Amino acid sequence: MTDHTSRLSGFATATRAERLGVLAERLGGDAEAVSLLERLGPVDGELVDRMIENAIGVMPVPLGLATNMIVDGREMLVPMATEESSVIAAVCNSAKRCRATGGFQTSYAGSLTIAQVQLCGLSDPHRARLEILGREDEIRVICDEVDPQLTSLGGGLRGLEVRILPTRAGIMVVVHLIVDTRDAMGANAVNTMAETVAPTLASWTGARPLLRILSNLADRRLTRARAVWPAAEIGGPEVVEAMLLGAEFAEADPYRAATHNKGIMNGISAVVLATGNDTRAIEAGAHAFAAQNGCYGPLTHWECTEEGSLAGTIEVPLSLGIVGGATRIHPVAQLCLKILGTDSAEALSRITAAVGLAQNFGALRALATDGIQKGHMALHAQNVAIVAGATGDEIEFVAAKLRQGGRVTEAKARKILDFLRA
């Protein structure tokens, strides 16, 4: 995808056909790719049957583009799949407000994934631990033979950890296989390694191997992003202060932190879903990481710079891939990766973290000023109009009346619709 500015004036008010025209131009006139979206049903029946069991159809989720994004100096459009009103609008608005300071700067810790092997029934766990650690080279040979292609691409076993874990059922020994999965999320590869090596570990130690599976707490795959918003772009020093107080609330209170992080994941999960990655794994890892210090806390941190600007950072585990699974076989997921112009799991992770930070800025600013409902319900009004029975041109008429009247309810929408039809 050729680099262009992601600042697309009027994109939100364009027709769907006009937006697809812009996208086709960005893709170098690739009309065939864009036609996938025109049909609104790009996954054929045979592929659906192969992706899940008992398939009866597909459940489409709206797919949109976040504009205004600059990530590590690169202008980009970011596909996001979500059913929630205002999510994409918040990212677009947040990204626009930090363009003057260069957008988002990111860093990436690497593509290491942990597979766990649980060993039970050991009376001498410390001896077993040393036995396993002393035979790391043999374990590496076993693991690397599981996936020679991964090894040929520079991946494979990178380290070994052995933990002695006291539990109510007695002491367990837990072996961590630390595997570089490169551009894959890597679940199948590391799970197979764990299952393959478990009998050997049992024969060395006399243990009973039980669970053999990856951990979704991907703390070896941390991605970080930072951005700075000038006070003038936010609404002045008072808004900066109010947003900082809101962030402190999340730092101090897990009840607030849960909603704070949910907003972050609104953005992250939308990119994960659009690219065919595992939303459940990412959600589980993020929330587990947020609780690692013994108390659940926020994934972002906010501070005031010397110039009085608002600076935000995010650190989140992102076990993403661009090969394998649905990412590889789903045509829309492949198109979304093409729109992003990403050629690695690292690049995708950096973009995703930036979107999470943008989403959090948008939510904090809304909460610190007009409240979350003003913008959300304005966008939600069309949905309420449709639920009330409006069709065609009626939808925007009813939605406009709902927005003018403050409260957005289905009962109110029905009254407006009845009046219009009368």
Image (tube, rainbow, N blue to C red):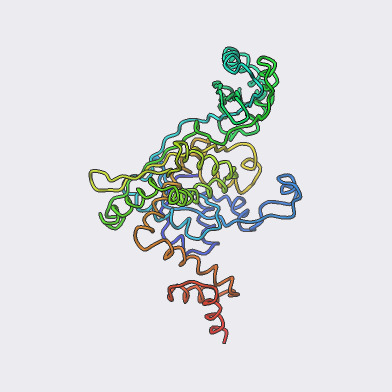
* Residue 372 position (above or below residue 28): below
* Residue 160 position (above or below residue 238): above
Rendered location of residue 66, percent (x, y):
47, 53
Rendered location of residue 199, percent (x, y):
70, 20
**Quarter of the figure with residue 153:** top right
Q: Which residue lies most toward the left here?
A: 307
Q: Nearer the viewer, residue 360 or 333?
A: 360
Name the residue rendered at 42%, 38% in the picture: 224
**Quarter of the figure with residue 370:** bottom left
Please state if 147 lies on the left or on the right of 65 as rendered. right
Number of residue marks: 0
Q: Nearer the viewer, residue 89 or 381?
A: 381
Rendered location of residue 117, percent (x, y):
63, 26
* Residue 76 position (above or below residue 384): above
Name the residue rendered at 40%, 56% in the picture: 93
Q: Nearer the viewer, residue 234 or 283?
A: 283
